[in-house]
Image (cartoon, rainbow, N blue to C red):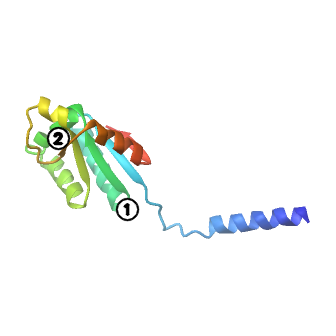
Amino acid sequence: MKFNLIITLLLFCSSSLFSQNPAEKKQTSIGMVIYSNDTETVWNALRLANYSKNQGDTVKIFLLGKGVELDSMVKTNTDLKEQADKFLDNGGSILGCGTCLQSRNNKEPQVCTYSLLADLYALIRENKIVLTF
């Protein structure tokens, strides 16, 4: 009797595992912290953010330290501007460390919004995956 119950449970579990449609992807939440002003690094981070959004994931970016320089980088680099605009146009959110922006005399950022350390903390706590660039 016990053996039959175990076999039944194993068959039920394995059938439910294999009956899932492989085309169904689970969405996840991704937080990205960009603290680099290296063009290639930032470009690849934005590309990944856009790809993730296209897969149905929620993505939020926080610019920290040199990362807030993205705001001025998009003015001279069309590839970065294209990726940042695509991300924002698709409902993405880019937050910028207010202290870091102030230290660079950027009082009116165009790409990101002034944010606090509390916003960075929330990004870390709320997202299943947090990546740094």
Q: Where residue 99 appears, x then y in whole percent? A: 18, 32
Count of numbered marks: 2
The answer to whether one can see residue 91 in this image is: yes
Q: Is residue 15 left or right of residue 28?
A: right
Viewer-proximal residue among 66 and 121: 121
The answer to whether one can see residue 37 in this image is: no
Q: Is residue 50 left or right of residue 80?
A: right
Q: Which mark is residue 70?
A: 2
Q: Is residue 16 left or right of residue 67?
A: right
Q: Which residue in the rendered view is the most extreme toward the right?
A: 1
Q: Which mark is residue 56?
A: 1
Q: Residues within 10 Å of mark 1 (few under 14, many from 20)?
A: few
Give the structural element (helix, strand or loop) at label 2. Answer: helix
Which residue is found at the position 65% from the left and 68% from the top?
A: 16
Q: Where residue 19 appears, x then y in whole percent? A: 62, 70
Residue 12's place in the image compared with 100, above or below, is below
Mark before the other along the chain sequence, 1 or 2:
1
The quarter holding residue 88 reads: bottom left
Which residue is found at the position 58% from the left and 68% from the top?
A: 20
Give the structural element (helix, strand or loop) at label 1. Answer: loop
Quadrant in the picture for the C terminus: top left
Which residue is found at the position 24% from the left and 41% from the top?
A: 42
Measured Cα–Cα span from mark 1 to mark 2: 25 Å
Viewer-proximal residue among 9 and 45: 9
Q: Are marks 1 and 2 in contact (CB under 8 Å)?
A: no
The quarter holding residue 77 reads: top left
Quadrant in the picture for the N terminus: bottom right
